[in-house]
Image (cartoon, rainbow, N blue to C red):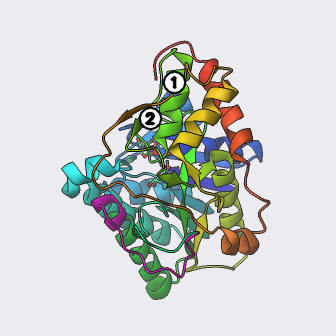
């Protein structure tokens, strides 16, 4: 199968590329390397360095490659950047997505998987674990631009018959994650543990997140494209999460334990809470798990052990 992955040199994208290569797919990565790295990709993976907002070039490239499946992950992903520069955020996440949808439609792609966020789309106070039926109430420009991208995707399904669906990820963590991401806290804490420093916790540490291992995300994306290629699930929106809430304090303690540090040595340093942060977040993944035929998500302990093993093996700074 021929797979085009936008944002394929990033944290999640490169994990997906590994999974595509492992099953023998022919992969083309499109990435402007604004946060992704060529070094995230296995040697020999075809990478075109291109901004997805370059509509003409992207259309040409996509038409030439003729992908069966397009996985759209390229995005501005930092909530704080979106607050400081909402125009840039919307430009990449809204116009960039439109450019990808158009290119995929014109190239006759049989499946388009659009990656969105559950953590930033549902508002504070949404019932937990949150289902897809909950009305989106994004609190940040990032959440708003991802919601607009979702709506444009639905428009392309309705108006052009594009075989596309949307996946809303929880807080994804795992090897290769840069600390600036939505679940960058796992990456940051692992890095602290590796360099002998204590973790910094904003607020009282009682805020919760739904931490999702990156391998589960790749599995969900592959299953989504397979179903779309079989003529199913176009226009659907699925949460991809674990349904389990963990506090930041619990997370720090678990990472400390896995890293073999004593509880006092890895005790959090508390600093004032950051404005605009959600208090609690947790997605109900059951609809997507059933529709996509996926196994139960990786447990936090197993996922953190794999993530810690990757951090421990790294010689330099992140
Ligand atoms: N990490 C999370 O917890 C999380 C949670 C929910 C949703 N997501 C979504 O998953 C996707 C991947 O996120 P990630 O965590 O791997 O982030 P990442 O920053 O590692 O990956 C994004 C990739 O997109 C590339 N990119 C950015 N702007 C581009 C542009 N204009 N043209 C071409 N390439 C561009 C970057 O260079 C990078 O390689 C994003 O769509 C993000 O919104 C991530």
Task: Determine the residue positioned at 49% across, 79% down.
Answer: 134
Residue 295 in the image: state x and y as whole percent. 80, 60
Tell me, yes or no, if residue 186 can be seen here: yes
Of 209 and 174, nearer the camera is: 209
Magenta residues: mostly which secondary structure? Answer: loop
Tell me, yes or no, if residue 47 can be seen here: no
Task: Determine the residue positioned at 32% across, 67% down.
Answer: 144
Say whether marks 2 and 1 touch (CB < 8 Å).
yes
Examine the structure image and report whether residue 140 is included in the region drawn in magenta: yes
Left or right: 94 as drawn, with respect to 125: left
What residue span does the magenta drawing correspond to? 129-144
Identify the image quadrant of the N terminus: bottom right
Vertical placement of residue 189 versus 144, above or below:
above
Which circle marks residue 191 in the picture? 1
Examine the structure image and report whether residue 99 is included in the region drawn in magenta: no
Q: Is the residue at mark 2 in contact range of ligand 1, meaning its CB lies under 8 Å from it?
A: no
Left or right: 233 as drawn, with respect to 267: right
Which circle marks residue 179 in the picture? 2
Secondary structure beneath label 2: loop
Vertical placement of residue 109 versus 44, above or below:
below
Residue 213 in the image: state x and y as whole percent. 64, 47
């Amino acid at each position: 199968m021929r797979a085009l992955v936008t944002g394929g040199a990033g944290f999640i994208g490169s994990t997906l590329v590994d999974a595509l290569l492992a099953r023998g797919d022919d992969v083309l990565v499109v990435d402007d390397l604004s946060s992704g790295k060529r070094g995230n990709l296995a040697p020999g993976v075809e990478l075109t360095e291109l901004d997805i907002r370059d509509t003409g070039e992207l259309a040409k490239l996509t038409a030439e490659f003729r992908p069966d499946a397009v996985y759209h992950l390229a995005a501005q992903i930092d909530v704080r950047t979106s607050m400081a520069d909402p125009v840039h955020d919307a430009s990449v996440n809204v116009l960039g997505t439109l450019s990808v949808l158009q290119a995929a439609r014109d190239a006759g792609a049989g499946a388009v998987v659009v990656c969105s966020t559950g953590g930033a789309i549902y508002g504070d106070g949404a019932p937990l674990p949150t289902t897809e039926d909950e009305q989106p109430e994004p609190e940040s420009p990032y959440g708003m631009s991802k919601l607009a991208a979702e709506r444009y995707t639905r428009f392309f399904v309705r108006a052009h018959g594009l075989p596309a669906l949307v996946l809303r990820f929880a807080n994804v963590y795992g090897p290769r994650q840069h600390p600036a991401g939505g679940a960058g806290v796992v990456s940051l804490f692992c890095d602290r543990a590796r360099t002998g420093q204590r973790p910094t916790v904003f607020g009282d540490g009682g805020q919760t997140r739904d931490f999702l291992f990156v391998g589960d995300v790749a599995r969900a994306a592959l299953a989504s494209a397979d179903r779309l290629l079989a003529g199913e699930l176009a226009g659907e929106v699925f949460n991809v999460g674990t349904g389990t809430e963990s506090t930041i304090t619990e997370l720090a303690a678990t990472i400390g334990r896995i890293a073999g540090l004593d509880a006092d040595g890895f005790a959090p340093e508390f600093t004032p809470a950051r404005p605009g942060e959600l208090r609690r977040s947790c997605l109900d993944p059951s609809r997507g798990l059933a529709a996509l035929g996926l196994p139960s998500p990786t447990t936090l302990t197993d996922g953190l052990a794999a993530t810690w093993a990757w951090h421990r093996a790294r010689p330099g700074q992140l």
